Amino acid sequence: MCCRPRSVAMTLSPSSELAIPSPAFLRAWTVEGQRPSRLLRANQQQLKEYKLGRNTEICLEPLEKEENLGPHDAVLRMQMRLPGQRAYAPCADLVWDTARGWTASSLRQRVAYFCALPVEKIEIAKYFPEKFEWLPISSWNQQLTKRKKKKKQDNLQGAPYYLKDGDTIGIKNLLVEDDEDFSTVRDDLGKETQKQLALGKKSQEALCVPSSDLFSGAKTPGRPRAPEASLSIHVGSFR
């Protein structure tokens, strides 16, 4: 259910009349594990200033309209839950100003404004595609009451959300649906596949155990101990 940007590769001949898109109509991402990882925001900044490692892959995402992201703007893939279905509408880009922090309350206000819904009538969950799981993002007043713990836990960049650019969030409209399930049929199939792969791996590991290890717990007669021999040690002089 994760939304991936389309990558673009362009090869132009000297005589080509194909117009090169303006940087304002492109997003540049680094790629890790075939997924967008880090958003390269400043269009005027040189690549060497990003301190990218060797052999770093970069993909370009074409945009339908001009975009100039600020240093505090985060880009999330937002999907609205379809009422009465375990499915979501196509994803839409949500640009979120995090100048006041990556807090749950700030994200809820931005999502509510984008969806034209009351803040108290939405639920948000982050999607973990590698686990096929959705983790609900609690609001500020739903967290622990102690101020220190609140301040520590209300940073969505930290555990357990680790929210970053390019992540997918699911939105539920509580005006039409009030259950707590964010999962989809695809998530069920993905978890079942992972479970079967894990069981198959365990079976293969069991078959690879040496036969000597299988019977290591059986009692075997020990060898008779040889008589102890006397030992003499002489220390020489190296002076």
Image (tube, rainbow, N blue to C red):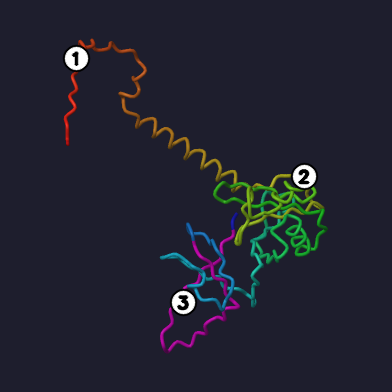
Q: Which of the image's four quarters has the C terminus? A: top left
Residue at x 83% of width, y 58% of height: 118
Element carrying mark 3:
loop
Q: Label 2 sits on what residue type?
A: Lys
Alpha-carbon span between mark 1 and mark 3? 83 Å
Task: State which quadrant residue 69 falls in.
Answer: bottom right
Q: Are marks 1 and 3 in contact (CB under 8 Å)?
A: no
| Relative height, residue 31 to residue 129 (above, below) | below
Q: Nearer the viewer, mark 1 or mark 2?
A: 1
- Which quadrant holds the N terminus? bottom right
Dot 1 alpha-carbon crowd within 10 angstroms: few under 14, some 14 to 19, many 20 or more: few
Number of the label disc, if any, that sits on residue 10? 3
Vertical order, 19 against 179 (above or below) = below
Q: What amino acid does circle 3 point to?
A: Met
Report the magenta residues as a range. 3-31
Q: Is residue 232 left or right of residue 148?
A: left
Give the labeled residue for mark 2: 146
Query: Disc 1 marks which residue?
Result: 230
